[in-house]
Amino acid sequence: MTAPFFRIALILGLLSAIGPFAIDMYLPALPSIGQDLHADNSVTQLTLLAFFISFALAQLVYGPLSDMWGRKLPLYLGIGLFAVASIGCALSTDIETLIAFRFVQGIGGAAGMVIPRAIVRDMHTGVQAARLMSLLMLVFSISPILAPLTGSAVIEFYGWRGVFWVVMIAAFIGLVLLATQLEETRSTKERSGSGLKSAMAAYRLLLTDRNFLTLTFIGGLGISSFLVYLANSPFVLIQHYGLTPTQYSFAFSINAVSFFTVSQATGWLGERFGLVRVMRIAVSAFALAMVVMAVVMASGFNQLPVLASFLFIGYGFLGLVIPTSAVLALEDHGEIAGTASSLMGTLHFVIAAVAMVISSIFFDGTAVPMAAGIALCAFSAFVLTQATIGRRAAVAAAE
């Protein structure tokens, strides 16, 4: 692979990580924010919910805009808005103002989640697209490794407001890289047929495309399993197992290491065995690891090393599921790649939100409900894969 290939992956990965970085780095700041702004826990958590809601819904807008205006202009607008909102968050003097700026911050951050996937589809298809997507995931996965540790360090020395100054600087760096290192990948000719009417038609097409929806839901269920862990792990690992915040940050990071390390084999495996086969096997192994984990934990073997071992294995296989499902979902929609990426991102977050709500209902402070929620997401992805992708592959092989 050439140097430009890695350079593009690095830039797209950094742009994709800006929004999630504002989530992962922000988590250790929640208690101090509540104390400083005199808000109870439930109100303080609205600052996180506001970001999630706008981050999910705004993705529906950026994709069609990137099809109409090209990829770079909506990225400028989104990341610029994110930077301005970050300054507003840092200067907030009450919880209501912080919630409002977090909502705006989510709107801006959504651009970095949607448009890089469309750029990958503009540039490559098939195995090459999977290889670039996995490299993008490598950079993107640095966020859950570094963000909690960075957030804890920043809060210790500069307080919670320092978190927002750091993400503002990250957004500024993203803008500089976008301006100087990334070329436009959607030509003027390709944009000419795009507009509001064509965007609505594209959404109708995608919502009736069974293959696109199936692959999107498989990827969404995989992401949901990780977000269920994200939402519950601070309480389980710190309060139940007694880890310190720093120890928790390292424990959290280990799963991200497993995810992005295995994801780097996507291109090689896809070239050798085909992306569909790689995804089917990876989903099966992912589901097996998580279901066995839930059964073992429910049987009374719920020590932290047991939980950590199964999560490490399961999220490693998830590192193959996410890039392959995304590439395969976008494969047939190059002309509307931005819109397709938008719908994919929003559906991923909707699925994750439902999973997080369900897991919170049954959460009792122990690891068992969390493990069960993760296993349910993984098993659902397996069933959906076997009922649709697996069946089509078997029919194709028989012909």
Image (cartoon, rainbow, N blue to C red):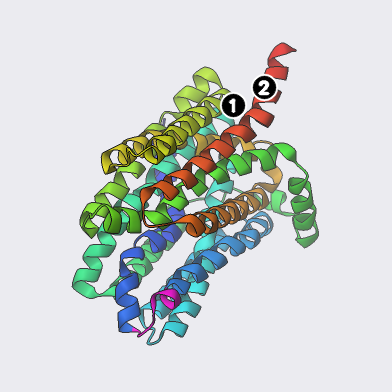
Q: Is residue 243 magenta?
A: no
Tell me the quarter of the picture where residue 83 sits.
bottom left
* Whole-number angstrom distance, CA of label 2 to CA of label 1: 8 Å
Q: Residues within 10 Å of mark 1 (few under 14, many from 20)?
A: some
Circle number at residue 276: 1
What's the residue type where badge 1 is placed? Val
| Residue plotted at (58% across, 51% down) | 348
Q: Secondary structure at mark 1?
A: helix
| Residue plotted at (54% across, 63% down) | 55
Residue 1 x %, y %: 41, 30
Q: Which residues are magenta?
A: 37-44
Q: Quadrant of the C terminus?
A: top right
Q: Which residue is mark 2?
A: 393
**Observer able to see residue 4:** no
Q: Residues within 10 Å of mark 2 (few under 14, many from 20)?
A: some
Q: Is residue 93 above or below residue 377?
A: below
| Residue plotted at (43% across, 62% down) | 175
The answer to whether the residue labelled 2 contacts the one labelled 1, judged by CB atoms less than 8 Å apart, is yes
Tell me the quarter of the picture where residue 397 sits.
top right
* Of the pair 93 and 232, the residue shown nearer to us: 232
| 165 left or right, relative to 124 | left
Q: What residue occupies the far left of the structure in this picture?
A: 157
| 195 left or right, relative to 161 | right
Circle number at residue 250: none
Q: Is residue 385 above or below residue 248?
A: above
